[in-house]
Image: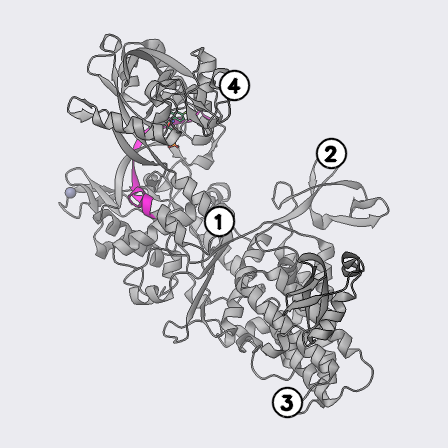
Amino acid sequence: SERYNARDAEPRWQRKWDEQAIFVSKNDDSRPKYYVLEMFPYPSGRIHIGHVRNYTLGDVLARFMRAKGFNVLHPMGWDAFGLPAENAAIERKVAPKAWTYDNIAAMKKQLRSIGLSLDWSREFATCDPSYYKHQQKMFLDMLAAGLAEREKRKLNWDPVDMTVLANEQVIDGRGWRSGAVVEQREMSQWVFKITKYSQELLSALDGLDRWPDKVRLMQRNWIGRSEGLLIRFALDAATTPAGESELKIFTTRPDTLFGAKFMAISADHPLAQAAAAKNPALAEFISDIKKIGTAQSIIDTAEKQGFDTGIRAVHPFDPSWKLPVYVANFVLMEYGTGAIFGCPAHDQRDLDFVNKYALGNTPVVCPEGQDPKSFVITDTAYDGDGRVINSRFLDGMTIEQAKEEVAKRLENELRGNAPVGERQVNFRLRDWGISRQRYWGCPIPVIHCPKCDVVPVPDDQLPVVLPEDVSFDKPGNALDHHPTWKHVTCPTCGGKAQRETDTMDTFVDSSWYFARFTDPWNANAPTTPTVANRMLPVDQYIGGVEHAILHLLYSRFFTRAMKATGHLALDEPFAGMFTQGMVVHETYQKADGSWVQPAEVKIEVGGNGRRATLLATGEDVAIGPIEKMSKSKKNTVDPDDIIATYGADVARWFMLSDSPPDRDVIWSDERVQGASRFVQRLWRLVNDAVEAGKAAPATRPASFGDDALLLRKAAHGALDKVTSGVERLHFNVCLAHIREFTNTFSEVLQRPGQPAADLAWAIREASQILVQLFSPMMPHLAEECWQVLGQSGLVSEANWPQIERDLLVEDSVTLVVQVNGKKRGEVTVATAAQNPEIEAAALALDAVKLALDGKPVRKVIIVPKRIVNVVG
Ligand code: ANZ
Ligand code: ZN
C-alpha cells in the first residue's frame, strides 16, 4: 500500500466532520452530558505549541466520551479583550476591533487544522457586544445585590502622561512610554465583593476532589484565612498626639505577647498621619517608603525600614511596660488593622527589624528538649512548636494553651466599655478591583450624574457599546478622550451626565464564558438557567497552572454571584480541573550571544554527543538549557510548520506520548520523526490486516486457536488499559499500551501462510479495536483506516468497543513462598494450577531448600493466589 498522506487526508476529514456537523451538541439531547473545556485562547494572532497541547488533551477526552455515549459539550471561543489590541493600535495604527477579529480568523483556521472535535456553532468572542451585553447586565444585577461597589483604591499614576497605568505598563517603577517615576494615586474604583465569599470559597475547596492538590493549596493560600486576636493597646498619653488614645493590632500569635519589643504601623495608618503632622522628618520618611508601592512582592523583598514616632504603647498585661511605636515599611494598611506588635524572636521580619534598630529580642517559645537558659535567637527567628518561657503566667504552656489563655484574659478585660481583646478571623483575600482605565474592555454600564450620583444604565439601553471612532494619539484611556461618547443625559433626571469610562478587568470576561457556552443563542439573558444547570458544571477543565489562582477563583466567585442573582443554580463551575505542563525546548545560541530558532539548526549525534550547527552557514551554535518556549529565546516551534511537515496527527501523538500531561514535554524533532514513522507503521499494519482478515467468516468462530487467542487478549487488554487510562487522563500510558498492542499485532501478522478462519476473524476484530483505540489521539489517520477496514460511517461517531472481560483474566498468578512464616521467595504458576503442582514448584526453589536445611517438610499450607507456607 501507499504511504499515508496526511496533507491530503487531514483537510478532507476535517471537511467531512464539518459537513456532517458531528461535533455540534444539542441542548435537548437525552444522553448523559459531559462538558469538556480547555481554557479559551487570547487572540494574539497565532496559536502556539502550548495551545496545541492544551486542546489536544481536551480533544482526546471529548472524542473518547462521545464514543462512550455521552452528549459531549466541547466548545471554543475567544478571550478577546485586553491591552495587546490597544498596543497594536498604537504601534501599527490598526483598530483594536479589526486587529482582534483578524487574529481570531487566523487562529480559528489554525485550530481547525489540528482536527479538534469542537462545537463551533457556539463560538463567541468576549468582545462581541452580544456577549458583553449580558456581562453588563450581570454587573448591574450585582450592583443591586450589593456584590459590586465603589471603593477608593491606589492606582499607578504616570505624572507625565497623566494617565493610570496597568501593572504591566510599569517597568522598574517607571511608566512604559514616558519613563516617568510612577506614583500611587487614590481613586474611586469598582470592586466585586468577593470577600463576602471568603470562607465559602475556602471551605468548598475540600469538595473539589478532582482538582490537583497543588491548585487547591494555591487557592487556600491566596484566600489566606488566619485566626487571631484583635488587641487594643492603650497609648501613653504624654507621648501621643491629641485625639489618639489607643492602637488596635491584629495578631495570630498572642502567645508571644511577652516577647514584644516594639509596635509598628503602616505609613497609611491614621496614627502615622497624626504623628507626621508635627514631625517633618517622619513625614519625609513616610513619603519615601510610599514610593515603593504596595505590591506584596516588593514589600517582601525590600529592606525593613522604620521610623520611631516617639509614641509609646502600653503592654496589655503590664501598665509599666512601654513599647515604642514605629512607622514601618513592611506593615500593610490593607491587612488586619494596619498595625502590629513585633515579637522578633519568633518572626523573621520583626527580627530583621530589631537587629537593624538594636531593640533586642526575648525568646518566649522554647523548642521541646532545649534548655530555655541556653536558647538564644540571633539571626533566625524560631517559628516552630514548643513550650512558653519568659512569659509570667503563660510559662510552661503549649502555644495553643497560651493563645487561649491570652485571648480569654483580654476578652474579659474591659477598657471603656469594650473588651481589650477580641477573637477575629482574617482573610488575605481582597475585594476584586475590576476597573481598568482602558479602551478595549467591557464598558462598565453606569452614568455619573452630578445630581443623582451613580445611575445604572437602564436595561433597554444595554449594551453600552464601545465606540469605534477612537484615537490612540494621546496616552491613556481612549474612551475618556473620545469627543462625544461619554457625554449623555442622566436617565433619572435628564440633566447632563457622564458615562463611566472605566472598562472591566478582562478576568471578568473569562469568569462566566463557560456558562455562556451552554446557551450562547439566548439574546435576552446571560444564561438559560434550565440549560445551564443541566450542562454545568464543566466536567473536565484543562489549562495552564498560571491560571490556577486568579482565573479559577474569580470564576468560582462569579458562579456564586450568578447564583445569587438568579442566572444559575450551582456553586462550583469546574468539577474536574487539570493543569497541563508546558512545552519546552532546547535553546541555541550563536557565538555572539544571539538566539537561533530550532528550525535554523542542524543537530548531529556523534561520538562526542550532540552537536549543533547553523543550517545556512555551518557555523557552530551552542546548545543551551531546555526552557519554556519563548519568543525572546527563539526556542519556539510553529504549529503551522509542524502540521505542514508531519500532519496534525503526528503533532498530537507526539504531545501525548512523551510525558504525562501534567509534566513538561520536551519538544524534540527526533521524537517527532519517531511519531511520524509510527503513523506510517499503523497505516501499513491496518492495510496488512485488511489483507489477512479477508478470509474471516462472517460469524464469530466457536473457538480460537493459540495465535487468535494471543491477539484477542492483546486487543482487549489494550482496550481495557486505554479505557481506564483515558478516563484518568493518563494519556502517555495509553499510548504505551497501544504501541505494545501494535507490536503483538505485527508479530501475529508476520506468521507465514494464510491465517486460518479463527485467526482471520481475530485479525479483523483487532484491527477495528486498534483503529478505535488511537482514534481520539489521531482522528484523521483513524478515519482513513476505518474506511480501509470497510466500515460505513465515521470512526468519530462509532461507539467505543465492548471489552470482553474473559479475555482479561490473567494466565498466571504469583504466590509468595514462606518457610515457617518467613518470606523466602515467589513462584509463578498457571492460574489453573492445582495444589500439588504449586507445592512442587515452591519446594523446588533453592531458597526454600536452603531454609529447610535438610529438615523434612511437615506440612504445606496454600492460601489460594497469595501464599505458600512451608512448615519444616
Ligand atoms: C505578633 C506576632 C508574633 C506575629 C510572632 C507573628 C509572629 P497571617 O498569618 O498572614 O494572618 N501582621 C498583622 N497585620 C499585618 C499587616 N497589616 N502588615 C504586616 N504584617 C501584619 O499573619 C498575621 C501576622 O502578621 C500577625 O501576627 C502580625 O504579626 C502580622 F511571633 O503578631 B503577628
Ligand atoms: Zn441625574
Separation of marks 1 and 2 at Cα, in angstroms = 44 Å
Q: Marks 4 and 2: which is nearer the front?
A: 4
3 or 1: tag closer to the N-terminus: 1
For the record, the magenta segment spans 180-200
Q: Which residue is mark 4?
A: 379
Q: Is residue 174 magenta?
A: no
Residue at label 3?
A: 700
For the view shown, which residue lies furthest in the left direction? 493
CB at disc 4 and ligand 1 closer than 8 Å: no
Identify the residue under disc 2. 592
Say if 618 sits above or below 656 in the image.
above
Distance from label 3 to label 2 (Cα)?
69 Å
User: Given the image, on which type of amino acid does mark 1 rest?
Assistant: Asp
Label 1 or label 2, whichever comes before in sequence order: 1
Secondary structure under the numbered disc 2 in the rendered image = loop
- Closer mark to the observer between disc 1 and disc 2: 1
Instruction: From the viewer's side, name the closer residue of 459 and 559.
Output: 559
Give the class, few, some or many, for how many residues have Cα within 10 Å of label 1's Cα (few <14, many ≥20): few
* Residue 197 seen in this snapshot: yes
Kindly identify which numbered label has been placed on residue 302. none
The image quadrant where one finds ligand 2 is top left
- Outermost residue to the right: 607
Residue 115 visible within the image: no
Q: CA distance from mark 3 to mark 1?
A: 48 Å
User: Which amino acid, by three-letter code, is at mark 3?
Assistant: Arg
Q: Going 72% across and 71% down the picture, which residue do you hit?
A: 838
Give the CA separation, mark 3 to mark 4: 80 Å
* Quarter where residue 207 is shown: bottom left
The label nearer to you, 3 versus 2, is 3
